[in-house]
Amino acid sequence: MSATDRALGSLYGLAIGDALGMPTQMMSREVIAQQFAPFNRFFPAAADHPLAAGMPAGSITDDTEQALLLAQLLLDGGGRVDEQELARRLVAWEQQMRQRGSLDLLGPSTKRAVEAVLAGESVEQSGRYGVTNGAAMRIAPVGIMMSATSLPSLVDRVVEASRVSHNTGVAIAAASAVAAAVSAGIDGASVSEAIDLGLRAAELGANRGHWVAAASVPARIRLALDLANSSGSASQAIYELIGTSLASQESIPAAFGILALHRDEPWQACLTAASLGGDSDTIAAIVGAITGAVHGMAGWPAEAVSLVKTVNSMELDGFAASLLALRQ
């Protein structure tokens, strides 16, 4: 399997997981089970959904759109992130979303931070309160572009892509875990090896950025892995004990737990993540990006790829090839 196939698998996996979780985001696990059982395909969002009202089955959300925004910024910068430009593009993206009538806009950490940057605050300070999963949800392109042979270098690039909005140890740890796991997959790692590398990167990232009072991302990833390996109803245990909120120390460990639960089942991993409850679109997008990097395009049903392409008028081949061309 080529690196190009793995990069494509990662980007399409991100989009597939995102689209599967689109109609279930911010719902409880119990309500999802009542409204969507059996959860085995793409569903449209309900007309009264608070974020995705009326969106057709297969629609992506902010997770994929912001990941592609970051990918384009990396390509424009020859692999580097212009942090002021990132802030400007995120604001422009939100304006476009409003014009389209979307309610799925910038998250609380990102919105507060980019407004501060555009008002003149330094990027070192703008993201000092960013603890949600916004940096992790869009970081996959950094994992495609950066080899994990030097984890400190990879974490440096994660910081560069994150600190404008999420310059805290907890958010950088979460984003580092995702980027490193994706990068490991591009290099041919198994899911277990990708998880291990993601955990090591999380430990490095936890020491970057501003300290905030929050649970340890690496420790909670380990707990999620233990639950996946020992519990008869692992997904329920992850939902109850790890949590599935926007918090970096919940949603990213939850994603790693689901990866461990379905190591060789990319499609099922995304289905489980998308029906988990809470921030299900982000959790499933992260699961899809990592397991897609490991398994490549063969991991995704052809009809799923076709639907996501068609509904979103999206082709990702160019992004995959161009990010790989920058890989170092």
Image (cartoon, helix red, strand yellow):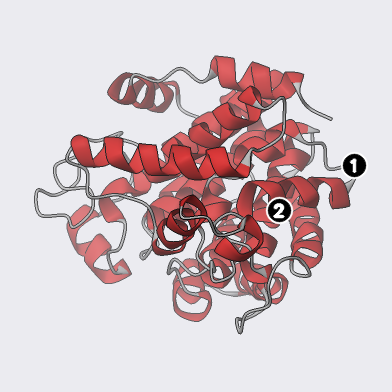
**Which sits in the foreground, 102 or 194?**
102
Q: Can you say which quadrant of the picture contains the C terminus?
A: top right
Q: Does dot 1 land on a helix, a strand or a loop?
A: loop
Q: Is residue 192 left or right of residue 36?
A: right
Side of 177 where 108 appears, left or right: left
Q: Amino acid at mark 2?
A: Val
Type of the residue with mark 1: Thr
> Along the polypeptide, which appears first: circle 2 or circle 1?
1
In the image, residue 12 sits, relative to residue 203, either above or below, namely: above
Q: Which residue is mark 2?
A: 159
Residue at 42% x, 69% y is 245
Q: Determine which quarter of the picture holds residue 279.
A: bottom left
Q: Is residue 135 visible?
A: yes
Identify the residue shown where x is 66% and y is 18%: 322
Query: Could you say where residue 30 lies in the image, as x and y percent from the top left?
Result: 27, 70
Secondary structure beneath dot 2 equals helix
The quarter of the displayed image where residue 29 is located: bottom left
For the N terminus, the image quarter is: top right
Residue behind mark 1: 149
